[in-house]
Image (spheres, grey):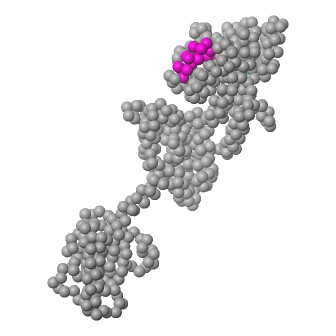
Amino acid sequence: MPKKPRKTRKPKQTAIVRFLGRPAKPAAKLKQREASFRLLFDSNPIPMIVCALRDERILAVNDAAIQHYGYSRSEFEKLTIRSLQAFDPELPWADSHSGDERAARTWKHVRADGALIDLAIYSRQLVYGDQPAVLLALMDITERKRAEAQMTFMAQHDGLTGLPNRNLLRQKMDDILLRTRRSAEQVAVLVLGLDHFKAVNDTLGHGIGDALLRGVAKRLRSILREGDALARLNSDEFVIVQSRVTRPEDAAFLARRLLDVIADPYLLDGHSVVIGASIGIAMSPGDGDESEKLLKNADLALSRAKNDSRGTFSFFEAGMDARAQARRKIETELREAVQSDVLRPYYQPLVDLSSGRITGFEALVRWPHPERGMISPAEFIPVAEETGLINAVGGLMLRRACMDAVQWPDDIRVAVNLSPLQFRVGNLLSLVMDALNQSGLSAKRLELEITETLLLEKSSEVLATLHALRALGVRISMDDFGTGYSSLSYLRSFPFDKIKIDQSFVRDLAANPDAQAIVRSIISLGKGLGVTITAEGVETEAEVNCLRDEGCQEGQGFLFSRARPNAEIVSLLKAQRGYGAALVA
Ligand code: C2E
Ligand code: MG
Ligand code: MG
């Protein structure tokens, strides 16, 4: 028989338990057992509660429970176990779950101060006094849960901005795609890349770069609707998944808003920082119906937007993938071509228009491809610039051009094109000095052609390098003048030796009064500044006559000669010398 608790005993001392179904023990033994159980219960560091099975009232608690929950013993005994539970309508000993399920479950209880705690609860039925009861051991797992939640968050979010990362984005995209599959709506995936973010990092430091990324994330988040997803993929790439899209115009509208919201200056640590962005858009289901494909296609569209003109957006189009593959093939083959040293300069003459004599040659890179024949630099220079191979190509051209030119007569110059990227590496000056020293070519016979894009950044390092090159005696030409961001301030920022009028103004010069007006202005500008003016792309007698009439000093074009290998240059010059002949009378 179970022993009744004595009335005078405090609840603390009444934790006398006997497991249900066990046979009764002799009184002395039972007493000893009770004492052991009491000790186990009372001084157990794990919070324990005994509840009545019938009405769920709390019959007894140990010290650890009092401490943990913040209720006094008498307060506890006015409560039921349900009144401790935050949300659960079920009881911890409910039998609808298997033992394993129950063990794996987390319960949320409310403490006396209102704080929520997470618990794993172990229960055991017994007889308490003379009534059926349940002993509950309450393991607090709040900290473990918090750490787990933190780990899960970190595995799914970007540490810098707190935005979802690629993993979580994939899950969210899959959900959105699944939801929209059953409707007539579309989903737009916008990949947004910041323009020239690296320059911010390089010039203002990583601290400002990080703050800028956080600022961008905040602005992007502020204009998205609930149901859209936002994530940060790579250092300066964000993805927006727009749901409930009915027409591509909806995505275009959002893209414009995103570009606008990013464009406002950011005030970071006393610096006013301006950053632009480009966006590539892929639409589901048209451009793909699963997340990886949509992301890839939006990425291809982003490359197009960046190549076309930064600060814009571009939709994915069929064929972009094939073009991207072709580009990757060029990249691999170009790398091999550089390694096996098959690139060669060809030389196109620059002709003095009044005498018709050759004054120099422009070195133009040529890539003899085993299957495709000669590949145009217009096709592979952009790839070389994107991949960094341009430094190898540029270095090779400089060395070869100087080596070849030193074999030519002393009054013949050689012009070499420089990519703006070669200025970023920082070793351009020593590269030029080495090429001159190794070949023995006099610096005054070397011309370097740069384009306006180089001066866009107005960087003091670029100007310093240009001045240092000029101090060596090298001449600096402005190539393709009139095509880029043609600003007269560029001409003021550096004393160029030569301006090359882009061939688009020379085309049909005789028949086009607008082109004539532009060419005339550039020529008079050159005269005013004391700079040689060269016309590019001269193809006809009519053009050369017109240029000569306008007072243009120098010309280059198919009318005189295409670019030729060095072996032909030597004989071309010999002919000019030998017969005193000019290319154009
Ligand atoms: P660019 O420096 O303006 O070179 C002139 C381009 O115009 C050359 O094309 C030349 O073949 C072409 N051209 C010359 N005369 C005529 C003409 O009468 N009519 C027409 N339609 N075209 C003419 P190319 O060799 O295909 O080079 C294209 C561009 O690639 C060059 O333009 C230059 O920007 C770049 N490039 C070539 N070689 C190098 C190099 O070694 N380094 C770098 N960074 N860029 C290079
Ligand atoms: Mg050039
Ligand atoms: Mg040019």
Q: Is residue 81 above or below residue 239?
A: below
Q: Quadrant of the C terminus?
A: top right
Residue at the farthest left position: 8
Q: Quadrant of residue 85?
A: bottom left
Q: Is residue 453 visible?
A: no
Q: Is residue 570 above or below residue 96?
A: above
Q: State the residue in front, 144 or 161.
A: 144
Residue at 70% over, 18% down: 439
Q: Quadrant of the N terminus?
A: bottom left
Q: Is residue 437 above or below residue 11?
A: above
Residue at 39% over, 69% down: 106
Residue at 44% over, 78% down: 99
x then y, percent, for residue 91: 36, 76
Q: State the residue in front, 89 or 349.
A: 349
Left or right: residue 185 compared with residue 330? left
Magenta stretch encompasses residue 21 = no
Q: Quadrant of residue 273?
A: top left
x then y, percent, for residue 515: 66, 17
The boundaries of the magenta stretch are 462-477
Q: Is residue 148 visible?
A: yes
Q: Is residue 82 above or below residue 298?
A: below
x then y, percent, for residue 87: 35, 69
Q: State the residue in front, 202 or 189.
A: 202
x then y, percent, for residue 162: 44, 49
Dominant secondary structure (helix, strand or loop) of the stretch shown in magenta: helix
Left or right: residue 575 compared with residue 191? right
Residue at 63% over, 36% down: 387
Q: Quadrant of residue 26?
A: bottom left
Number of numbered discs on residues: 0
